[in-house]
Amino acid sequence: MSRRGEFGFIDFIRSNFPDPEGTTGIGDDCAVMPSGEGELLFSTDLLMEGVHFLRNESSPEDVGWKAAAVNLSDIAAMGGTPVATFLSIALPKDALGEWADRFIEGYTEISRQFDVPLLGGDTTSSLRDIAVNVGVLGRCPSGGRLMRNGAKVGETIYVTGPLGDSAGGLKAILMGIERTDDVTRLICRHKRPIPRIEAGRILMESGKAGAMMDISDGIGSDLRHIMKASGVGAVIDLERLPLSPELVSVCKEQGWDIYEMATSGGEDFELMFTAPAGLENELDIAVYPIGKIVPGNELSWRFSNEPMDRDFDGYKHF
Ligand code: ADP
Ligand code: MG
């Protein structure tokens, strides 16, 4: 990449992200920020063209949105508050310019919506594919963070919103079905997931939750992480899974298996957590009980209290 191109691009990013008061962001060798109190949270996620997005299927704005969203979701999943992001990006020649600038527009839009500054990163050329790595820094009061290992036998399993919409949106894109209003809404849930930062913080502050994580691979896969880390089993009641009216109607029209989608399709980025029963009536946010933590190490599925001899095991990257 020409130095001019690289620095012109960084200048453009910088113009979208002025330094917050008391913090030095883009422009020096390191970002500098006050360290404050409590515990720091840090996570990164790598997105590869051809693996996580296709240049001709997703707009650059949507890729920029999602690159930030999935990282903010990791902070939400701990009950933390995002403080800043860092963006490293490798750009082939044909992506510097319009693609990269539009990517930054989407990244800026979600960053402003959740009031999270971009404080630095790195920019380099790539021979062919675009690669994007976002690092996110968050904060949480000492001891408040919610981990995957805190689930206890007898707790109820909850999620913060409808499951399967993103998987429905992805399937609609891949199959090229007609873009009705319902289909368009599912596709939007896939391309522009909303990190559940507020819900995560409220759950952390409630002091009620045992374990928490965000749903990126479907509950059939993600719940097993909580089970393994906590040394417990789980039972899910399929008929209790929250399903959006859009997903219900599109699945009916297309003949898609809605439970497969809601359990095994990834990228909803709702939160899943464990807590005492009855929490759905105690909080200012909607939470949906979907099952129970039980002794053992098995995940089983029921429908109307009847055991099912079927498994749903989530999205696999390999
Ligand atoms: P260095 O030589 O220290 O890596 P660079 O010239 O790569 O510095 O970057 C200059 C400044 O621009 C640094 O503050 C860096 O954090 C910031 N920066 C570079 N690329 C990006 C990017 N993609 N997003 C945000 N900030 C960036
Ligand atoms: Mg650099």
Image: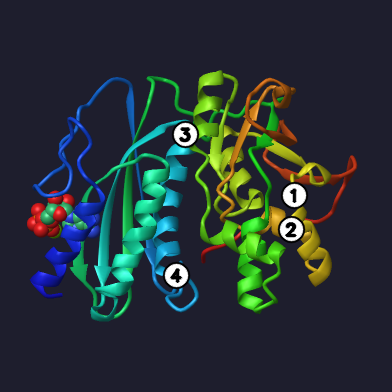
Which of the two discs, 1 and 4, sits closer to the camera?
4
Q: Is residue 314 visible?
A: no
Mark 4, Cα crowd under 10 Å, few <14 / some 14-19 / many 20+, is some
* Amino acid on which disc 2 is placed: Leu
Relative to the observer, which residue lies in front, 305 or 267?
267
- The residue sitting at 74% across, 57% down in the picture is 246
Residue of label 3: 78
* Amino acid on which disc 3 is placed: Met
**Left or right: residue 279 compared with residue 117:** right
Which comes sooner in the sequence, label 4 or label 2? 4
Residue of label 1: 243
Which comes sooner in the sequence, label 3 or label 4? 4
Report whether the residue tagged 4 is closer than 8 Å to ligand 1: no
Q: Which corner quadrant of the image does residue 48 belong to?
A: bottom left
Residue 247's disc number: 2
Q: CA distance from mark 1 to mark 4?
A: 27 Å
- The residue sitting at 37% across, 39% down in the picture is 115
Which comes sooner in the sequence, label 1 or label 4? 4
Where on the image, by quarter, is ligand 1? Answer: bottom left
Which of the two discs, 2 and 3, sits closer to the camera?
2
**Left or right: residue 129 compared with residue 171:** left
